[in-house]
Image (cartoon, rainbow, N blue to C red):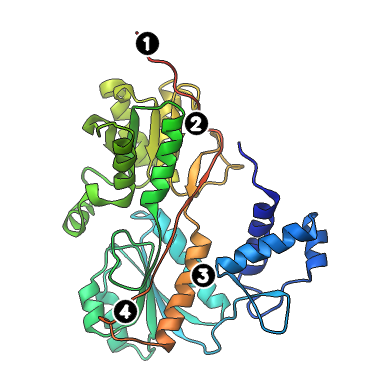
Amino acid sequence: MIRQTKTREVCEAIRREFILSGDFYNQLLPAEQALTERFGVSIVTVRRAVDELVREGLLEKRQGSRTAVVMPASAASRTIAVMIPEMQISPSYFYMGTRIANLLRRRGHQVQVFAGKDTDAHELLRFQESSDVRLEGAVICGYLVNHRMLRGANFPYVLAGGEGRWDMDNISFDLRSGVIRAMEYLLAHGHRRILFVSNYFDDGPHIESLRRTFNFKETARFMGYADALFDAGIEVDENLVLHGGSGKRSAYLAMTRKWKQDGLHGATAILASTDFVAEGIMQALNEAGLRVPEDISLVSCTNQLDPNDSLFEPLTTLDLRYDEVAVRAVDMILDRIEHPVPADDVYVSYCLIPKLLLRSTVAEAKPEKV
């Protein structure tokens, strides 16, 4: 495991304690000396950490003060909708959406949550027409939404975490670039046959909606997987693409079937689309007598599992920076409400590249047997 630098550790501590909690908006950070004592580091390290968070836009420096302060909340209380896919459809977006809703509440705004199968716009607009509560805007988590309907209603909204939508206000994580980083890490460890396990079903209650909305091969995770293989001179092998569904059980069943059918088709490593999928995979591998990472390496994409609260090895995974997405999505929708522009005139797109967290589930590939 690679240790974080002291500056990065202080960055994360300040982010966690003073920014993402939502309890310190419009308040000064403690003095530099107090922070050095709190975190047990030098004043230079504290200054570097604060400067980095200022560059990220999570802190700001106010005129007349040398002390960094948390970005202020909007002065006016708003009523904002948050649209979240159901947990069983997309745990990642559900997790992110609840953080956005909680952050809005902590800033003093009213929140109306809409949770549905595909975060469709019908329910939101019906609520807007029939309720005494006026929604001033919405943060939409995911990508399965009727954009034409919302635009036609002249309703301000921000897309949080969507894949492949760049013609509207959005804040997202660049999963394609993140997956390329994860794949490059596996390739650097000698893995050439890497099984990709998606978080979609071969069939199921929502597959038709998915097929109407986008092509699986155009999703960010798969494109990152294919791009990294291409750059390494390796063709995508359809036998090394498995649809594992969105949860632990579905992934466990899919991996068990795959193991019985062809022994994972010679894969020495696995890229799982989510940590929940990875957990199901680890259970199936364990029952098949395969050890992670001694027999097969595993990398995931969502950093949703507590590495200290797992029956398996701490998972090497991508940190999608949900907390930063939440902060920026909230700031973006409030700014759009206060400063509207014509829908076809300009839009703002902000993209965060996931960070690869190196833990215990990747090892060097074993030499192929001759």
- What residue type is disc 3 on? Val
Residue extending furthest toward the top = 370
Q: Residues within 10 Å of mark 2 (few under 14, many from 20)?
A: many
Q: Quadrant of the C terminus?
A: top left
Quote the CA–CA distance across marks 3 and 2.
32 Å
Dot 4 corresponds to which residue?
Answer: 346
* Residue under the point 29% across and 28% down: 258
- Residue 293 in the image: state x and y as whole percent: 50, 27
In this rendering, the answer to whether 151 lies above or below 315 is below
Quote the CA–CA distance across marks 3 and 1.
50 Å
Find residue 362 and name its label: 2
Q: Residues within 10 Å of mark 4 (few under 14, many from 20)?
A: few
Q: Nearer the viewer, residue 276 or 352?
A: 352
Quote the CA–CA distance across marks 4 and 3.
21 Å
In which image quadrant can residue 351 be found?
Answer: bottom left
Dot 1 corresponds to which residue?
Answer: 369
Find residue 327 and name its label: 3
- What residue type is disc 4 on? Val
Horizontally, residue 275 falls left or right of residue 119, namely right
- Callout 1 secondary element: loop
- Which-is-in-front pick, marks 2 and 4? 4
Tell me whether the residue at label 2 lies in contact with that at label 1, contact meaning CB atoms closer than 8 angstroms.
no
- What residue type is disc 2 on? Val
In which image quadrant can residue 169 be found?
Answer: bottom left
